[in-house]
Image: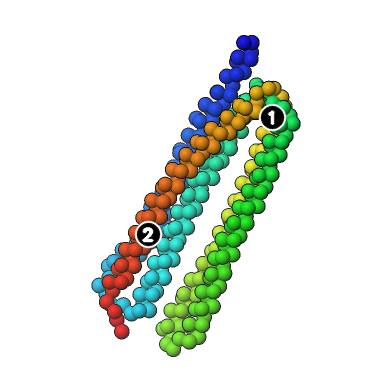
Amino acid sequence: MNPSRKLRSLVPVAAVALLAVALVAPAANAANIPPLATTAQYKALVSFVDKLDKRSNTAATAAQKATYDGQLDNKHDAAVNKSTALFNRGKKAAQAESQRAFKTGARTIRQTEAGELAALRREYDARMDRAATNYENAVGRVEVVYDSRTASLRKQIRRLRDQKANAESLMRKAQVQEAIERRVKRGADDRKLQQEEIADLKAGYRREKDAIRSAKASATRVVQQGDDEAIETLRNRGKRIYNTRVRTLQSRRANQLGDLENKVNAGRAAIARMPASS
C-alpha cells in the first residue's frame, strides 16, 4: 500500500475517535442545566403539597377545595412544563455538540480523503431540504400545541364567565374572577413561550443552515475517493452517541414525571381528607 494512502486511510478512524471524545461534552454541559428539584416550579409544587398536608385536618368548603385543586393542577402543570423545557435544553445541548463534533470530524476527513463533488452536492442539498422541512414541521407542531392551549383556555374562560354571571354571592364571583385571571395570565405566558420557542427554532435553523453550507464548501474543496464512506461512518457514530444521550435524558424525565405525579396525588389526597365545612 502506498504510504501516503495508508496514512490517509487512518483519518476516518481518527475522526470517529475525535467525535466520540467531543460528544462527551453534552454530559459535561448537563451541569449547566439545573436538576428539576432545584427549580422554582418544583419547589412551589412541593411547598404547596406540604401546605395542603398541614391543612388536611382543617375544615374547608367545596369551593375552597376546588380552589386548592385548581392551584395544585396549575403548579403541577408548571413543574411538568419545566421538566419538558429542561429535557429540550438537554437535547439541544447534545444535538449542538453532536453537530459541532460532526463538522470537525467531517472537515478532518475531507481535508485528506476524496469525494465526488456531485455526490457531495446531492448529500448536502438533501440535508438542507431536510433541515427546512424539519424546521417548518417543528414550527407547525409548536403552533398546533399553543393553538390547542389557547382554544382550551378560551373555552374555560367562557365557561367561567357564565359561572360568574350566575353566581349569587360576591365571594363566589370573586373566586371565579380569580380563576378567570389565572387563565388569562396563563394565556399571556403561553404566547410568550410560543414566541420564544419559535425564535429558538429559527435561530437553530439558521445555525444549521450555516453549518451545512460551511461543511459543503469544505467538502467540495477536497475531492478524493473514500470521503463518502468515512463521512457516513462518522454520521452514524454521531447518531448512536447522540441517541444514547437522549435515551438517558428521556429516562430522567420519566422519573421526574413519576415524581410529579406522586406529588400531585399526595396533594389531592390531602384535599380529600379535609373535613367538609358549610
Please identify the residue farthest to the right as the structure is shown. Answer: 118
Q: In the rendering, at what x and y percent does residue 249 appear?
A: 45, 45
Question: From where the camera sits, is residue 31 visible?
Answer: yes
- Where the C terminus falls, by quadrant? bottom left
Q: In the rendering, at what x and y percent does residue 82 appear?
A: 46, 56
**In the picture, residue 113 is in which quadrant?**
top right
Q: In the rendering, at what x and y percent does residue 134 appear?
A: 63, 48
Q: Which mark is residue 247?
A: none
Given residues 171 and 161, the one toward you in this image is: 161
Q: Residue at x 44, y 89 (%)?
A: 168
Residue type, numbered disc 2: Glu
- Where the N terminus falls, by quadrant? top right
Q: Residue at x 38, y 79 (%)?
A: 63
Task: Report which residue position mark 2 lands on.
Answer: 261
Q: Earlier in the sequence, mark 1 or mark 2?
A: 1
Q: Residue at x 55, y 73 (%)?
A: 154
Q: Residue at x 56, y 59 (%)?
A: 193
Structural distance between the alpha carbons of marks 1 and 2: 50 Å
Residue type, numbered disc 1: Ala
Above or below residue 162? Residue 9 is above
**In the picture, residue 262 is in which quadrant?**
bottom left
Given residues 262 and 118, the one toward you in this image is: 118
Given residues 199 and 218, the one toward you in this image is: 218
Given residues 193 and 268, the one toward you in this image is: 268
Task: Report which residue position mark 1 lands on.
Answer: 219
Q: Secondary structure at mark 2?
A: helix
Count of all numbered marks drawn on residues in the image: 2
Left or right? Give the position of 155 relative to 137: left
